[in-house]
Image (spheres, rainbow, N blue to C red):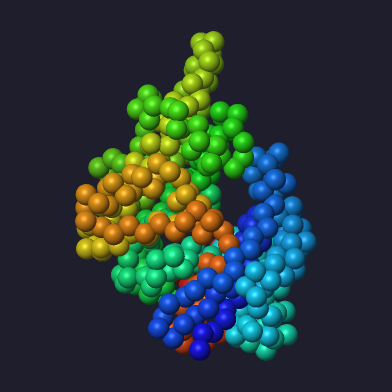
Amino acid sequence: MARIIMGIESSCDETGVGLVAAHDDGTVELLADEVASSVEQHARFGGVVPEIASRAHLEAMVPTTRRAFDAAGLSMSDVDAVAVTAGPGLAGALLVGVSAAKAYAAALDVPLYGVNHLAGHIAVDALQHGPLPTPCLALLVSGGHTQLLRVDDIAGAITEIGSTVDDAAGEAYDKVARLLDLPYPGGPPIDKAARDGDPHAIAFPRGMTGPRDAPFDFSFSGLKTAVARWVESAQGRGEQVPVADVAASFQEAVADVLTAKAVRAATEAGIGTLVVSGGVAANSRLSALARERCAEAGIELRIPRPRLCTDNGAMIAALGAHVAAAGHKPSSLDLSANPGLPVDTVLV
C-alpha cells in the first residue's frame, strides 16, 4: 500500500505544498503540486525582500495546503509523513514552513522529516523519469545556487564537486535583465529576447575556464560585469543597445560553461547520467546545449519539466519519500530552520 507524503517548501518566494504516493517498488507518484508565488511583490525591488517573502508565506500556507489536498482528492488523515525544507534559504521564510510542518505532523501524529532544499531539486526528477540511477551527476542551477553534485544516494550521500565562487547563474540573469530593462525575474525575459538574437554577436567571457582555474567551479560575476561594460560603452557612443543580441550572447556564455563543465565532470568520473535541475534548468538554450553535448558524450540527460524545476512542495515530498523509504530516523519536533544548511546534509 502506498504511503502519502506531504511536502512543504518555503525557502524563498514560493509557498509550495505537494503530495506524493510512495509505492513499495520504489517509485514515487505525484498527486498534487500547488504553489503560491510572491514574485510580483518583489519585482519593483529587483530581487526578493525577505520580510515580504515571510509575510507572503504566512498568508499563503493554509490556502495552498487546502488546494493541494483538494487537487489530490485526499484528506489530512490520509497523510503518513510530513517533509519540509529545513534549509538552505531565507531564515524567516524557512521558519514559516518549518513551523507549519511541525504543527501538521504533531496534529496528525505522523513522522516529520526536515530535508535539504537542494537535494529536493534532484529528487523531483524521480516524479517524471522514475528512480534515479546511482551514481548520477546533478547540475543544480537556480537564482541562489550553481553546483555540480555527485549523488550516490539521494537519501543521504550527496557530494559537492563544484560550485560558484561568486554569483549564481540565476542571479546573473536577474542582474543582466536589469541592465537591459527587462522584467524581474530575469531568466524568462532573457530567454525570450535571445530567440531573436545572434548568440555569437558578442564574445562575452567564459569564467573559470583557464588552465589554472578549478575545473568544476563556476564564476558569473565577471560575465555580468562584461555585459554591463558593453552596454555602457554602446550607450556612451549614442548607439541603441541590441537587446536580443546581448541577451543571446550572454545566455550562450552561461550555457556553454555550465554544460561543458557538467559533461566533463561526468565523463571523468565515469558517470552515465546527468540530471539538470533548478529554475534555470527551464532555460531553452541550456537544455538544448545539454542535450547536444550529452548525446555526443554518450551520457543520459534528465531534465524535469519546467514546473518541477522551480521551487515547489512536490520536490520536498519526493525527497521525504526517499528518506522515509531508506529508514532514516525522523526529525524531532524541536527541528530548527538552518539558512546555511550544507548540501551534504540531506536530513536534519
User: From where the camera sits, is residue 208 visible?
Assistant: no
Which of the 4 quarters of the picture holds residue 115?
bottom right
Instruction: Describe residue 183's horizontal placement relative to residue 287 as left or right.
Output: right
Report the quarter where the C terminus lies: bottom right
User: From where the camera sits, is residue 134 visible?
Assistant: yes
Q: Position of residue 256 (x, y in %)?
A: 34, 41
At x 67%, y 73%, the residue is 69
Q: Nearer the viewer, residue 81 or 257?
A: 81
Q: Position of residue 32 (x, y in %)?
A: 59, 69
Q: Establish if 243 lies above or below 30.
A: above
> Which residue appears farthest toward the top when viewing the image?
238
Q: How many circles with numbers are drawn on the protein?
A: 0
Q: Position of residue 67 (x, y in %)?
A: 70, 67
Which of the 4 quarters of the picture holds residue 51?
bottom right
> Which residue appears farthest toward the front when viewing the image?
73
At x 65%, y 69%, the residue is 71
At x 65%, y 78%, the residue is 74
Q: Position of residue 24 (x, y in %)?
A: 44, 86
At x 53%, y 49%, the residue is 143
Q: Establish if 17 lies above or below 290.
A: below
Instruction: Describe residue 49's horizontal placement relative to residue 211 as left or right.
Output: right
Instruction: Describe residue 1's horizontal placement relative to residue 61 as left or right.
Output: left
